[in-house]
Image (tube, coloured by chain):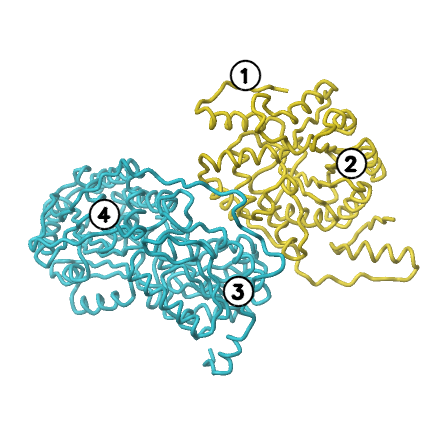
Amino acid sequence: MAKKTDSQSKAIAGRAAQPVSGSHALDFGKAWTYAPSPEATDHIKLDKRYELFIGGAWKKPRAGKYFSTISPSTEEKLADVAEADAHDVDLAVTAARTAFDKYWSKMPGRERAKYIYRIARAIQEKARELAIVESMNGGKPIKESRDVDVPLAAAHFFYHAGWADKLDYAFQGRRARPLGVAGQIIPWNFPLLMAAWKIAPALACGNTVVLKPAETTPLTALLLAKLIEECELPPGVVNIITGAGPTGAALVNHPDVNKVAFTGSTDVGKRIQRAVAGTNKRLTLELGGKAANIIFADAPLDQAVEGIVSGIYFNQGHVCCAGSRLLVEESVHDVIVRKLTDRIATLRVGDPLDKNTDVGAINSKMQLTKIQELVKAGEDEGSTRVSAACALPAKGFWFPPTFFTDVAQSSRIAREEIFGPVLSILTFRTPDEAIEKANNTMYGLSAGVWTDKGAKIFWMGQRLKAGVIWGNTYNKFDPTSPFGGFKESGFGREGGRQGLAAYVELEG
Amino acid sequence: MLVIVAEPVILSPIVTLATVADQTSGARLVAPPNFNPASPTVDQVAVEERVAALAKRSLKKASKVAGLKLAISMMDLTTLEGKDTAGKVRAMCQKALYPLGSDPSLPQVAAVCVYPNWVRLAKQCLAGSNIKVASVATAFPSGQSPLPIKLDDVRRAVEFGADEIDMVIDRGAMLSGQYGKVFDEIAAVKEACGAAHLKVILETGELGSYDVVRKASEIGIAAGGDFIKTSTGKVVPAATPAVTLVMLQAIADHYRATGRKVGMKPAGGIRTAKQALHYLVIVKETLGDAWLTPDLFRFGASTLLNDVLMQLQKEKTGNYQSSEDFSKD
């Protein structure tokens, strides 16, 4: 990309500021409104305080420190959560080591499978409670936690339970041995689902686990710990400890951890990689993204607009594989922008527990500030901003569904991960240009291609440098399908046979 | 005057006008090639996903009641049977006027829909009300008759007093690629309708794919249809939420391009209040407020009304009543 000059910048800023309003705009008003339909929460009994789940028991943190976790949609405190220090981490790793040596590594795969199946069924049985708490603690709409997060979490346990006694067939001709203790650190965007992505393959392959959920969203991981307790796994096979960055660092640096698995920001991922350099710890990283969602003129346009919406507004855009850079063939740019403008007018932003909410609360004040800063950068650089004209609640952290047109490849909003409901729209003229722009990023986690021509999808798929490529759909997940990145989006895969490889040592 | 083009290659009103000019002036006019893109393609999986997502809207209390009352006001109460009689038509008209005798607060339905033979009687029964009489015509339901017979069918129904004509397109022509023939027939029927409103039935259950539904929708709209309608009710599947969404998207694109509002009528297979609300959600979130009116959205249905009444009574009293508490006409 040529560097943008001052005159080009002005030209972009000076272009029609309203690419979308026309005389024949559809009106999504109040002719017939939906009454509030909140999910009942009276049956949810949260503890006032959560301890650390270590060695099959709930242990108080040595330092006696706790931090509060809130609902980002109301800013109300939900519970106090223990803050594990290096000593507590050591207890957890020791418990995991003992469990590995004493029980889990010796147990036949078919026996491990029984426990993992049990966890899967327990998640299904408690699906409603888990979904509600996920939405309360994380801010995501109940329809997503109910229909995506929780069922997929159960599916990951079911899928991996099936592998536990079939590992010899996963890696034909080679014997798979467990690694030992896995230290796992997960992000706040899919708290329960990421716990499932991490724990299920580790257990299936015969490893034991110390998992640390994100400090803003610990509750569903702690509920999962309770389920695991009820499932009567041998003590110490799964340990769940809470805390912030220092707790995670202590886990990564613990000398008796054999494998580190991290999902989160590229910045922290780099620090972890530095920390484990020179040790014999195995490492997988699933980091940031700035995925290109590419729309050709021959695409099914109305459905492509749905793909844009699920690509960037699903989970408030707090998705590492979000389709945050829209590349549109220039001849359909205006029609796509117009359709998208109408579509975001129908998105319902508000109470995450309302069954009709499409876009919930931003996960934390810190994240909201980051989104606001990058949106301001987009405006300052002369891109045209379109935001849904929705009323936002007074309390809590909110950002309306937003997109930018007139975005240059050099714009900050086209290069940096915003991790919010903010889309940058760019154009291309030829498939080659689409590939060049799509790959012109430090990330490489995912991409989407929309076209009616099957051959074009394959042509693009061969050239896009991304770990996951969706054709005429977006943000679809399945435990059988490996997920992971290229370049600074990380390495290693989760899900499928490839995901098992991250948790085994292959012999022979 | 209208000319039927045997093998037109371009789907556009320009073809018809050019041909007419050719006949009247003797000058040789060639329609300019149409370089605009063809009809947008439709992705089956994504369309069905979208309507499934809209089915999850939770409608409670006031919004449910308002939606159900709106649904009644949008109903084309229909009887289209070989065994239709004066008694049957009279009874249906009575129900159209007074959906539930015990509750005068309920709206009347939008229209009754009958065969041409029953238009006069229906008009008499509904005299003095705002309820429209719609008549099917054009060799309904197959449409497999010569055009002059179809046009005659339409003119007579209009003479009998029909306010609205529900025509069927020539699906054979559509599926064999004779798009110009489909277009010209609709345009001719529109002309024969005079002041009567024209609903163009695509019979989507026979079209085989959403791509063809989308193209047929565009033809029906461009040829002058005031409404496009899914089905005759004589073919399974009849209306589905997904096929309705595809048609609504064609209407939206036409509105954005021209400012003209075309109506939509799903018909056949809509039997429950829950289904009706699902359709209304699809309309609300695809076309917006302007289409939430009987002028632009109708349900073609015969048994839907009673289920809607039952749900409304349940909202009012808190209890479900027996199906025998609602008249079966």
Q: Are marks 3 and 2 on the same chain?
A: no
Task: Characterize the local packing of mark 2: few (<14), some (14-19) or many (20 or more) Cα atoms within 10 angstroms.
Answer: many
Local secondary structure at mark 1: helix
Q: Chain of mark 4?
A: A
Residue identifier under label 3: A328
Residue identifier under label 2: B138
Residue at the bottom extreme, as displayed: A6
Residue A256 x/y as whole percent: 11, 58
- Colour in which chain B is shown? yellow
In the image, A130: left or right of A399?
left
- Marks 3 and 2, how far apart in space? 44 Å
Question: Can residue A506 be seen from the camera position used here?
Answer: no
Q: From this view, report whether residue A180 is shown above or below residue A31.
A: below
First reached walking from the N terminus: tag 2 or tag 1: 2
Question: Can residue B17 be seen from the camera position used here?
Answer: yes
- Marks 1 and 3, how far apart in space? 57 Å
Residue B180 x/y as whole percent: 77, 50
- Number of numbered tags placed on the structure image: 4
Local secondary structure at mark 4: strand
The amino acid on which the numbered mark 4 sits, given as a three-letter code, is Leu
The mark closer to the camera, 1 or 3, is 1
Mark number for residue B324? 1
- Marks 4 and 3, how far apart in space? 43 Å
Local secondary structure at mark 3: strand
The amino acid on which the numbered mark 2 sits, given as a three-letter code, is Thr
Q: Are marks 4 and 3 in contact (CB under 8 Å)?
A: no
Q: Are marks 4 and 2 on the same chain?
A: no
- Marks 4 and 1, how far apart in space? 51 Å
Residue identifier under label 4: A78
Residue A361 x/y as whole percent: 35, 53
Q: From this view, report whether residue B148 is shown above or below residue A185.
A: above
